[in-house]
Image (cartoon, coloured by chain):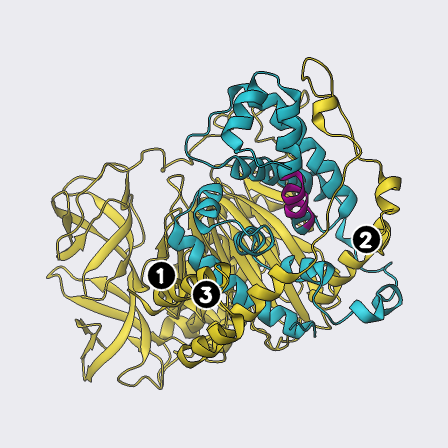
Chain colours: A cyan, B yellow
């Protein structure tokens, strides 16, 4: 696919060029989905929320102004807000329903994957991090966004993001060790 | 540049080199000589980047939602996604696995209930969702995770957890109970989010792994390891954490400090916690005022731009000041209230000198007489809390000096995640005599009299005295406890959360009729007539409406 810069695509999309909208979607939907997957831990939920992100993108696009913030950061912010709404709704669910009816873990996990770092074990470990640390880890190392973009997306200084990523990696390492999950 | 900042920058430098294609092994070898932690962090970062992360390939995308570009509701078909060969798990299995790991990480946690203890005035509860309605709380009601509790003006309540820990919620406050669970046989896991207002916590010591007690605020969080501490969240976004006994880690997104007994810190949104300082509570008369410093009963008190002054006190007025002693010995006010208050002041610090009749604590001379009660084993270098009264000649007379205890069982490299500890018998209630021993060789005669009157030990009475309560207050609390059936520690907890004794007394005397069921909502229930002052939930709690004027930073 030929590379189109986001600002050009945004201008065209704002003029109701459906092809530009389609390219924006193709460029960014994977990262948005992965961001939501690692936040929610549930693929169908991440799917639903991803589509909602782009629905909201289309509604908000006519009034969108870049203002120095990367377009992806804007999409990530929409995704973050949607996931927060999702968790608020889900918080009504009683904790009593959580662990007592679970099948034994070893009966559902693929033996080969049980102790290795993969997207599932990573997601489980990330779930135990503080919110800000988890977000930084996802954006820096899953989505591979530059530090500057992560800082703008989260509304924090670059120094703050550096601190979060170092402490996040440290905590994540300890969690993975406790979970006996290994990586190369 | 702090060591932490240096490490942050070094990691980022190596990450940039990794992103530009430099060989990981060589980088790790170089990094390992600087810092083993750095090498391992690089290894993990590289491993995450190498992972095959899930992909989403949709059947449709928004550009097909109509000529006008108007999006319609659309969802990816789950069945199609489930048939994708790249994933080997059904969505239900993934969800179950997710729950399994939550279960695993929380150590087989199961939901627990907390109980509403003493309640004064009006308090309400709702489920977590914004659209849920508020219902009145009563003493004895159960609370659980996911609920939100709020109090009205002149209201307060105590929440009791299954391990005996107590949380007092002060007037005009709101907290969410994010997690209330037991982990293992005897330990408990509690996470509270304090939206605004004041709380005080008496957390039972933990003796097994899995126990944690965390209070989060919009600007930071405190991880508790068995202590008595308080949290205040102001409308201007500043959170204050102070510790009576024990150790608390306070963290924000950008930094972390550890508070030991007697210390306090503040965090403003987006900032790191302030350096811990020994805390003080001072009641006195304003003698001089300037924008950056006041003199209160002969004591120089500094003010900065974050000092909250309420009630517009003037020279000659009585004020209550809560603040911290800075590293240079200056007394900085966090909050100044114009009010009549108890004549007892207090501060914490390190014992510098001990001479008969006069000690020096944190560089401050303080006099002792035959009525002064002290812990039996205080030595130079110990951390103590001093309750004192300011005499007419501005000298300070110690009423009690009690030794504060810290718990030294933490890994200094520990992160914000609490480390495992032991937990006591969950039926046990924290007993002041277990924490503070300040009876002295000759118990105070008033304490002896009260102990006989209320059939408790002298040590128990002295325990409350050494926490800063006068004998009149102690007598009142025990009397109210016997009258209402409310445990005496809950009555003190209400006081700790900021309730005046008048209100506590009035409510305890009416305890048989139950708490008010009037709503705190703006629109009253049809069957409820709201009392004056409760028709509208204020944006700012009473006494905190006025944001302090900007004051110049203090000059050192």
Horizontal placement of B351 versus B112: left or right?
A: left
Horizontal placement of A33 versus B436: left or right?
A: right
Element under disc 2: loop
**Residue B490 seen from this side:** no
Quarter of the figure that contains the C terminus of chain A: bottom right
Residue occupied by mark 3: B249
- The spot of residue A61 in percent (x, y) is 56, 23
Residue B295's mark? none
Magenta-highlighted residues: A28-37
The residue mark sitting in front, 3 or 2, is 2
How far apart are the alpha carbons under marks 2 and 1?
53 Å
Residue displayed at 37% across by 51% down: B271
The residue mark sitting in front, 2 or 1, is 2
Q: Nearer the viewer, residue B370 or A21?
A: A21
Disc 3 chain ID: B
Q: Is residue B75 above or below residue B384?
A: above
How far apart are the alpha carbons under marks 3 and 2?
43 Å
Task: Point out the tag, 3 or 1, that comes first from the N-terminus.
Answer: 3
In which quadrant of the rendered view does residue A3 lie? top right
């Amino acid at each position: 696919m030929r590379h189109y810069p986001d600002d050009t695509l945004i201008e065209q999309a704002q003029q109701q060029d459906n092809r530009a909208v389609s390219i924006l979607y193709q460029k960014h939907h994977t990262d948005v989905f992965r961001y939501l997957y690692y936040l929610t831990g549930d693929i169908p939920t991440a799917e639903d929320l991803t589509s909602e992100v782009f629905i909201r993108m289309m509604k908000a696009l006519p009034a969108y102004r870049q203002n120095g913030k990367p377009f992806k950061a804007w999409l990530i912010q929409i995704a973050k807000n949607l996931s927060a709404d999702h968790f608020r709704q889900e918080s009504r669910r009683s904790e009593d329903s959580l662990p007592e009816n679970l099948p034994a873990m070893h009966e559902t996990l693929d033996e080969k994957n049980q102790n290795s770092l993969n997207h599932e074990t990573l997601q489980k470990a990330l779930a135990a991090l503080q919110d800000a640390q988890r977000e930084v880890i996802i954006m820096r190392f899953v989505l591979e966004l530059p530090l500057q973009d992560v800082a703008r997306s989260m509304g924090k200084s670059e120094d703050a993001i550096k601190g979060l990523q170092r402490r996040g990696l440290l905590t994540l390492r300890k969690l993975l060790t406790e979970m006996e999950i290994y990586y190369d | 540049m702090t060591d932490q900042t240096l490490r942050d920058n070094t990691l980022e430098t190596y990450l940039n080199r990794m992103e530009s294609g430099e060989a990981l092994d060589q980088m790790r070898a170089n990094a390992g000589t600087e810092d083993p932690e750095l090498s391992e962090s690089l290894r993990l970062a590289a491993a995450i980047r190498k992972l095959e992360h899930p992909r989403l390939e949709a059947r449709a995308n928004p550009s097909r939602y109509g000529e006008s570009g108007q999006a319609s509701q659309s969802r990816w078909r789950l069945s199609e996604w489930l048939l994708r060969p790249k994933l080997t798990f059904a969505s239900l299995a993934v969800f179950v696995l997710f729950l399994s790991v939550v279960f695993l990480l929380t150590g087989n946690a199961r939901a627990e209930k907390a109980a509403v203890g003493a309640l004064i005035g009006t308090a309400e509860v709702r489920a977590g969702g914004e659209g849920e309605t508020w219902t009145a709380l009563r003493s004895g009601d159960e609370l659980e995770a996911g609920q939100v509790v709020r109090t009205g003006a002149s209201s307060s309540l105590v929440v009791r957890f299954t391990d005996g820990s107590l949380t007092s919620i002060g007037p005009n406050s709101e907290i969410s109970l994010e997690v209330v669970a037991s982990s293992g046989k005897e330990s408990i896991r509690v996470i509270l989010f304090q939206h605004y207002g004041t709380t005080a916590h008496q957390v039972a010591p933990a003796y097994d792994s899995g126990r944690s007690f965390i209070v989060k605020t919009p600007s930071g969080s405190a991880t508790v390891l068995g202590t008595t501490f308080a949290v205040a969240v102001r409308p201007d976004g500043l959170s204050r954490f102070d510790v009576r006994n024990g150790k608390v880690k306070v963290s924000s997104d950008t930094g972390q400090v550890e508070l030991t007994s007697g210390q306090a810190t503040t965090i403003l949104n987006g900032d790191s916690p302030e350096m811990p300082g020994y805390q003080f509570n001072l009641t006195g008369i304003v003698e001089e005022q300037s924008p950056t410093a006041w003199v209160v009963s002969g004591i120089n008190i500094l003010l900065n731009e974050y000092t909250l002054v309420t009630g517009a006190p003037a020279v000659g007025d009585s004020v209550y000041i809560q603040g911290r002693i800075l590293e240079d010995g200056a007394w900085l006010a966090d909050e100044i209230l114009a009010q009549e208050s108890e004549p007892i002041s207090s501060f914490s610090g390190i014992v510098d000198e001990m001479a008969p009749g006069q000690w020096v604590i944190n560089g401050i001379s303080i006099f002792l007489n035959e009525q002064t009660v002290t812990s039996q084993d205080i030595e130079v270098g110990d951390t103590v809390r001093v309750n004192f009264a300011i005499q007419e000649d501005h000298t300070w007379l110690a009423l009690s000096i009690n030794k504060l205890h810290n718990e030294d069982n933490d890994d200094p490299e520990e992160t914000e995640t609490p480390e495992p500890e032991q937990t006591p018998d969950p039926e046990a209630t924290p007993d002041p005599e277990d924490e503070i021993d300040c009876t002295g060789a000759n118990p105070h005669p008033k304490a002896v009299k009260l102990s006989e009157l209320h059939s408790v030990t002298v040590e128990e009475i002295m325990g409350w005295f050494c926490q800063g309560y006068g004998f009149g207050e102690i007598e009142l609390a025990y009397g109210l406890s016997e009258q209402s059936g409310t445990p005496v520690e809950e009555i003190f907890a209400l006081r700790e959360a900021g309730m005046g004794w008048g209100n506590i007394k009035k409510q305890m005397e009416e305890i048989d009729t139950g708490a008010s069921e009037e709503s705190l909502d703006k629109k009253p229930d049809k069957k409820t007539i709201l009392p004056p002052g409760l028709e509208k939930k204020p944006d700012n709690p009473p006494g905190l409406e006025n944001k302090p004027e900007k004051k110049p930073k203090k000059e050192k």
